[in-house]
Amino acid sequence: MGLDEILTESIGTLALNKVRTGLAMLGVIIGIGSVITLVSLGQASQKSVENQIKSLGANLITVSPAGQNVGGVRGAAGGGTTLTLADAEAIENSSEVSTVTAVSPEYTGRSQVTAGRNNTNTQIYGVVPEYLTVRNVSVANGSFISGQHVSSQAKVAVLGPTVVEDLFGKGANPVGQSIRIEGQNFTIIGVTETKGGTGFQNQDDRIFVPLTTAQKVLYGVSHLSSIAVNAISEDVVDLAKNQIGYLLLDRHKLKSPEEADFSFFSLTDILSTASEVTGTFTTLLSGIAAISLIVGGIGIMNIMLVTVTERTREIGLRKALGAKNRIITAQFLVESIIITFTGGFIGIMLGIGISYFLANSMSLPFTMSISSVLLAFGVSVAIGMVFGRYPAQKAANLEPIEALRYE
Amino acid sequence: MIRVFKLSKIYRNESAETLALKNVSFEIKKGEFVAIMGPSGSGKSTLMHILGALDKSTSGKYFLDGTDVSKMNADELADIRNQKIGFVFQAFNLLPRYSAVRNVSLPMMYGGIEKEKRHDLAIKYLKMVGLGDRLDYTPSQLSGGQKQRVAIARALAMNPSIILADEPTGNIATKQAAEIMEILQELNDKGNTILIITHEKDIAEYAKRTITIRDGELAGDKKNGTR
């Protein structure tokens, strides 16, 4: 008697009691379905968080001046004046720093800005053209600060969408008009694309001017507030930090990293923490869903035990006609595996459907990993084997005469 | 063919021991038609279970076709039941949702006979018991006599050494009972060895030899007059 015949017999028996088979299956369907849905949604939100962080630039490193020790009193971080344009140029040109694609020296200040009768208080960014690539910003309208503007200390400005709204009203095109910053007239040459808030600050509430203009014309300083650097890839961020660190130590004539008058910040640190948090949530939720699988398995065991009792006479007859114990075991085991396998399949389909629907309605990226589908299949078959084993053995161990006499 | 020697069976439970069979010895040759008679509780069912390899004796020997059945394990007993013995039960014991053909095919499935061949053989045996026009009927669509004829066809399926019929007419009307016994007689005429267990004298008279069991002991063994 081959497996194909055992399968036919089992399917026939299960088909006789469709309601019971369906109810037994339901436990597995719900269990597998919820595991699949929760894992998929967990991965989707993880991916979404990662994407949001990456949109800020996962390979971005920000070098800031450290607070300075003046007579033993440590100043505020970022308040120092140790970073200069020459440092930025060195990072870009040094042969020791091999992992960097673009460098954006920046100086930020805060000023009251007026346009006609409207005014606002916003961040003024002194930048170079590389800012666009390094900070992942694009221009919606007009053009950005050029190298020519930087070298000539031109009085031109590029506005963030929030500033445009504040000064000119929603949807206005201010390119060509002028604004006053610190009492000086600037011509607006462009507007940047909306980037949205990051949770830290509103990236759209900014005005960009040439770096030299900000330093010399507006604020009268020669240092930088930060240097933003793009590493070649996310994987070399740490190496790039090292290379830049030693270059700056050398330039600042400092002997050891403990004396550094600058510090690094990169999004990879946040990225790994965020992934860990969402990952923990996914595991936790899947764990809860897995409990429902166990409950489903117990349900199957229960129903199989009832079936064995109901079919005692049939089992006795089959044994009297020559069925060996292992054939009886196989038949009952196959029955419970069919229940869990089919339930698992329906559960997976249902889970994919639900998570696709939920991902769409929550505008998360839909993800479904082959590994979790395969795992779900494996688990459902395993549940059939584990919870079907006891009833199957109980059936096989029935004595044929006792079973035949059973009423 | 069948030889039992000093067969005893003791049932034990916590409180008591029951001696169901006491030193029963006899021999049945190929082609015989034997009735085992006895009142209920005489131990004839126990004897039938042991002869049918459904149960084991406590002591004594049971040889079937020269092999010692009393020493076999569960799997070997299953093979004996499948290949050497054809059962006909009082309560028919047909699978209710299966057609007559599938019921007859069942022992052949466990005997490893191919699907197509099984089907053909099942039809052949059903025709032999006069049910050629009821092949696809399920037991609930058949009368008691017809059910028992399906059971006889099933017993023939593996071409066994012996057909064991336990009160084959116990659940059917008298007229149909006669038909069943005539079928068994025909099969015996064709060379099948048949053993029936009964407590009814007129049923036992269809056989050529009657073994009587009383209180677990052999109480008689005689040839029947030809009818």
Image (spheres, coloured by chain):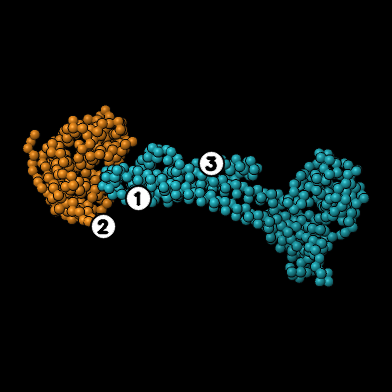
Chain colours: A cyan, B orange
B186 horizontally vs A378: left or right: left
Would you name the residue on which mark 1 appears?
A394
Label 2 is found on which chain of the structure?
B
Marks 1 and 2 on same chain: no
Would you name the residue on which mark 3 appears?
A350
Would you name the residue on which mark 2 appears?
B14
Quarter of the image with the N terminus of chain A is top left
Residue closer to the observer: A152 or B20? B20
Label 3 is found on which chain of the structure?
A
Q: Is residue B197 above or below residue A94?
A: above
Q: Amino acid at mark 1?
A: Lys
Answer yes or no: do the residues labelled 3 and 2 have beta carbons within 8 Å? no
Spatial separation of the CA atoms under disc 1 and disc 2: 23 Å
Q: Secondary structure at mark 3?
A: helix
List x then y, in percent, for residue A104.
78, 54
Quarter of the image with the C terminus of chain A is top left
